[in-house]
Amino acid sequence: MIILHYLNDSRAQRVLWLCEELSLPYVLEHYKRDNVHRRPPPELRAVEPLGTSPSIVDTGVDGTKKVVLGESGAIVEYLLETYGQGTECYIEPKSERWTVNLFYTHLSEGSLQPLLFFPLLTNVYKFGDPESNGKDTKYVCQNYINPNLIKFGRVITNRLRAVGPGNYLAGESTPTAADFMMFYTLGAFIARAPLEAVSEEMKAYIQMIKERPAYKRALEKGGPFSMIS
């Protein structure tokens, strides 16, 4: 049995959607951010030392093991390796599709999410030098953040064009680890990146995910969320 510790408006949506796609038995434990700083509650530290969400506790089929794991990317890979083999969501290692899947699985948090989080730190969480009146933030965005977002936007759009409408990042009609990771990041990308970085292919890709029955079930159980983190 899997216990998913689910914080509202968080990357836990990735794991919830994956659990639904794999039809895994799980229990959902809900947590709420505080209304002022949008931080997770301290109770999450009792589950996993970092106190972040998502985190899972997996007791296995017979309850004889206990795996505690944080980080959405690690959880996605763990669940697919442990319970996803033989399903269409799983890609065998060393295949051509596997390398593409591996790239986009790690592009999400490795390169894209830090770029998207910087404006959030300054605009929502109010980090930065208050005496600069936002000039420092504007400089970084104009000279580093936005040019890189435009570059990554071209790469992602070219990939979506290559696989064609109705297909996912690894090239087939079923989502894989790359999609469970990228959908959250790409949703934030569409909301925060410069307009010239955002394509119709990206919007169609996100809409395709939202129309999947498993995603709709995840949304019903987890509740509405925004990509704030």
Image (cartoon, rainbow, N blue to C red):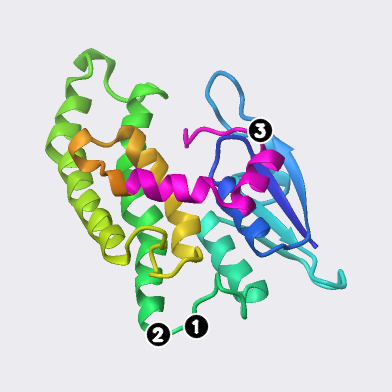
- Asked if residue 36 can be seen in this view, the reply is yes
Q: Relative to 7, is 1 on the left or the right?
A: right
> Who comes first in sequence, dot 2 or dot 3?
3
What label does residue 95 carry, if any?
A: 2
Q: Is residue 68 above or below residue 29?
A: below
Q: Determine the secondary structure under disc 2.
A: loop
Residue type marked 3: Pro
The residue located at (36%, 43%) in the rendering is 203
Residue 202 lies, in percent from the top left, at 33, 47
**Quarter-wise, where is residue 18 in the image?**
bottom right
Classified by dominant secondary structure, the portion drawn in magenta counts as: helix
The residue located at (51%, 66%) in the rendering is 174
The residue located at (28%, 56%) in the rendering is 156
**Residue matched to label 1:** 92
Q: For the magenta stretch, what is the residue range?
A: 202-229
**Residue matched to label 3:** 41
Q: Is residue 186 above or below residue 135?
A: below
Whether residue 167 appears in magenta in the rendering, the answer is no
Camera-side residue: 18 or 111? 18
Farthest residue to the left: give it.
143
**Of the residues tagged 3 and 1, which is closer to the observer?**
1
